[in-house]
Image (tube, grey):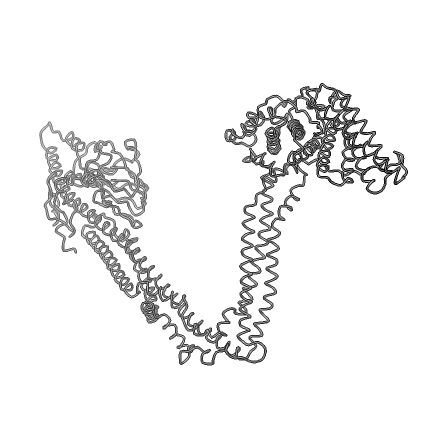
Amino acid sequence: MQAPMISTPLKATNEIDWIQPLKGYIRQTYGDDPERYAEECATLNRLRQDIRGAGKDSAAGRDLLYRYYGQLELLDLRFPVDENHIKISFTWFDAFTHKPTSQYSLAYEKASIIFNISAVLSCHASFQTRSEDSGLKTAYHSFQASAGMFTYINENFLHAPSTDLSRDTVKTLIQIMLAQGQEVFLEKQIADGKKVGLLAKLASQAAYLYSQAVEGTQDNVNKAIFEKVWLLVVQIKSNYMNSVAQYYQALADDDANSHGTAIARLQVAEISAKDANKLASSFPGTIPANSNLTAETGATLTEITKRHLTSVQDKLSELIKDNDYIYHQTIPADAALSVVPKLPAAKAIPVSELYAGQDIQRITGPDIFAKIVPISVTESASLYDEEKAKLVRAETERVETANSEMAASLDYLRLPSALQMLKGGFSQELAADEEFRGWCDTVANRDAPGPVFSYLDSSKQNIFKVLEKSSKQLDMEESVCEKMRSKYEGDWTQQPSSRLTSTLRNDIRNYRDALEEASHSDGQLYSKFRQYQSDFEEMRHASETGESDVLFQKALIQFGGGSRSGMSPAAEGGDLLGDDFHEGLSVEDQVAKVEDILKKLHLIKRERAQVLKDLKEKAHQDDISQVLILNKKSTSNYETELFQAELEKYRPHQNRLLSANHKQASLMKELISTFNALLKDKRVSREQRKHESISRQRSIVNNKYKKIHQEFLDLEAGLDSAKGWYREIKDTVDSLDKNVETFVNNRRSEGAQLLSQIEQERAANSIGQADQERERLKGLMERMSMDPKSPSRSRSQSISQNSTSPSARYPSTNINGQYQIPTALPPPQANTHAQASYTSFSPAPTVSQQPPQAHRQDSYSNANTQSTYNPGTYQSRASLASPPPEQTHFAQNFLRRDSGQPSSAPPTQTQFHQNQYGRPNQPISPPPTQTQFHQNQYGRTQPTSPPPTQTQFSQYGRQSQQPSQQQWLPQGYVPPPPPPGPPPLGPQQTFQQPGVAPVHGHGEYGYENPNQQRGGQQQQSSGDPWAGLNAWK
């Protein structure tokens, strides 16, 4: 039969919704999509619903409360649940009075959950079967955990909103839970048969706890919070435990021969047992449901107290009888008895310690909102990462410093290479190293430089030929142009070639100079090739035949580095390690000792590198975000203390690195002393000098072939650059040659058109002058006629008005032969209203995609209003009057009447408009600064070229026809006598009727006219007008 225990009733609550408030806060504060955390929010909400139906006496209900409270603690680190942020109303009912209380604070929710956890733990402990060890242990642990939960409420929730959470109520519950835990432990010790002294101390502590609980229970019963039966149970157990304590202490005193004291204690125990049995007998038969006590509680307590009273009375009678007959000790008064010592066996388990257990962590589960990390925690984690980085950098620097010191010391001692000399390793010194073999392989795998020089020379000669060809073409064109100018004088208006070809000639000259400089560079490369040609061939042959070592040894012999017999110096002088000096350690032993120290040093270096690697990996994987979240609400300066505590985990690695550095320092001292002692030997010194000599000679040979290898690479790079340069200059010179050819062809076409025009104009002028002379003679004859109806004056006016060629008019004089009638036109201002607007265009027209014939016809048209050039449409040339000297701009057709005859420009004129001087679409040479010529730019499909100084051209529209001004004749005018007749024709003058094609074969240049190939497609004659001047070549 086990004693009944008090268990706390649970608080009830209403249902709430966690989902929507949490989603809204995630969206507003963290700026994240709340739907990503829909599952987490639903999980938390489901946990809240599950705890409402958790059973008070089941392990499942306890685990649900454990998990929900653990998630609330983690939630509080990320989400502030209060009236100002996540606003949720938590309603809980008082566990004893059942009054509802509502608050928006998460602390109230956590306090209520903790209260229910404590209540469930007390219920779980009360219903355990303590006769079994597992049940007894569970009850003992649960009572202590319940007391710890209640303690957490009193320490962290100061202002209780309900009576069940008030400090006095919770304090009483703590005392009851601890007293019951102490009682359970006492039961276990009694069952195990422990010593009576220990049992007395445990019972005394239980009695003390129950006596404290009686006072608090009495107050809560008076306030109608606790049930009255709780007070009876506590009072009964207080008297019962006090009686048990006195009983076991009496047994202990009796064992200690204090028989009188034992009798006095048993008397006190009897009194307490009678009081307990009396209270148990008065226990009501009807138990309130809220008390969590069974109906058998009263009977059980009565039976326990009665049995204990019987035991006390039996023992008391026995001791009194023994004392009366045997011991005769004095029985002290009750007040004279000492207090039974207390031994606490039950203590409240803190919440932090409770949740640190593996079982509770498994029950609580992982953090639901682990993906959400507060900004403050992220900042703290960054600070911790910086502290880790500082630690890793410091340790890395120490390791690098130690490695550098070791390497510097070994390099100074020339270890371990110096040991090869002592062990007869000179034979290896005569073999070529991998670097030398690589140099030979490089020379052998690359192309030989010889054929490249032939390619460069042929490329250079071809380029010179192209430049010579271009220069001759320009010279020929200039020569023909000047010969035609000397023949036709002023009529040959083609621009001189010297001004147009200056840029082309400069380019030709520059390219010649560049080729001369390239020839000089080629010569330098060739001289370098001749200088090292034999070395290149040796290295190439050595690589191809696999005799790199032979070549290296020959070079050593050449510099005096090899022995006569080809044996190592060590072999000539005997085996150094085989000699024993009989004084101290032998050379072999000393060498072995040095090698052993070197092995230890390398082991230390590898171990140090591995420790550093482990340290870096551990630092890289170290993440204390969860630790920072859990400690977020601790002290204000928790970061510094937490960082120091976390960095202590790297202390073992730091200690291992420090120990390795100390070992290295001691081994280096030992190595230096041992190796210096070895070097002081005379035989070792002699061999060392030989080794140094061979090392110097190897260095000389290596430097020589390293230079040869570098020279080969430089020569190869120079030849590659030269080939690339010749390819580029070849393309550039070919482009220049095309430009020269285009320019010369354009000039030929331009000259051919000009020559054809000159001949046609001369023929037209000759026919026009003859017609005008006949008309003049006819008019004179009519005026001299005796017919009274002589129409002389009107006829003269008609001739003047209908004349189409002012060049057929001879100068008019007055009667006395002294007055000359002005024949010049009025000032140009009078005709400005008849000029059409113009548009400017770029001087470099693009090549049209039209067929050549159509493009040729369009290029000579003026806004589709000017007909294509046809020499047969021009009349004889008329005499023109010169413009005033101050005039610098001339409009289209301003100085021509109807025949389109040009006149010379004044000296001050610098701007010229298209067709200014009467010739339709007169071809003009390009400026001297122009070096790029487009196809058909100069006279094939678009023959007009800009003047040397003009960069923008004006294209005029067609002017309205101005009526020829009537000749003014003074009154009484008498015409002069007629001249003797028309002047004789020159050797080159021929009459040609308008519209009649010129005679074939009257050409001046020996070039083929491009227009001749287009025969019947053009309005001009199909014959080449320059075909008869082949002698000008």
Q: Which quadrant would residue 128 be assigned to in this image?
A: top right
Spot occupied by residue 283 in the image (x, y as percentages of width and height) = 75, 22
360 or 370: nearer the eye? 360
944 or 918: nearer the eye? 944
Q: Which quadrant would residue 462 be assigned to in this image?
A: bottom left
410 or 995: nearer the eye? 410
Spot occupied by residue 806 in the image (x, y as percentages of width and height) = 19, 38
* Residue found at the very far front of the displayed protein: 325
Q: Is residue 250 above or below residue 437?
A: above
Q: Is residue 581 above or below residue 10?
A: below
Q: Is residue 996 above or below residue 592?
A: above
Q: Which quadrant would residue 677 be assigned to in this image?
A: bottom right
Residue 686 visible (yes or no)? yes
Q: Is residue 100 above or below residue 798?
A: above
Residue shown at the point (55%, 75%) measured from the top left: 679
Left or right position of 828 against 1: left
Spot occupied by residue 531 in the image (x, y as percentages of width and height) = 34, 71
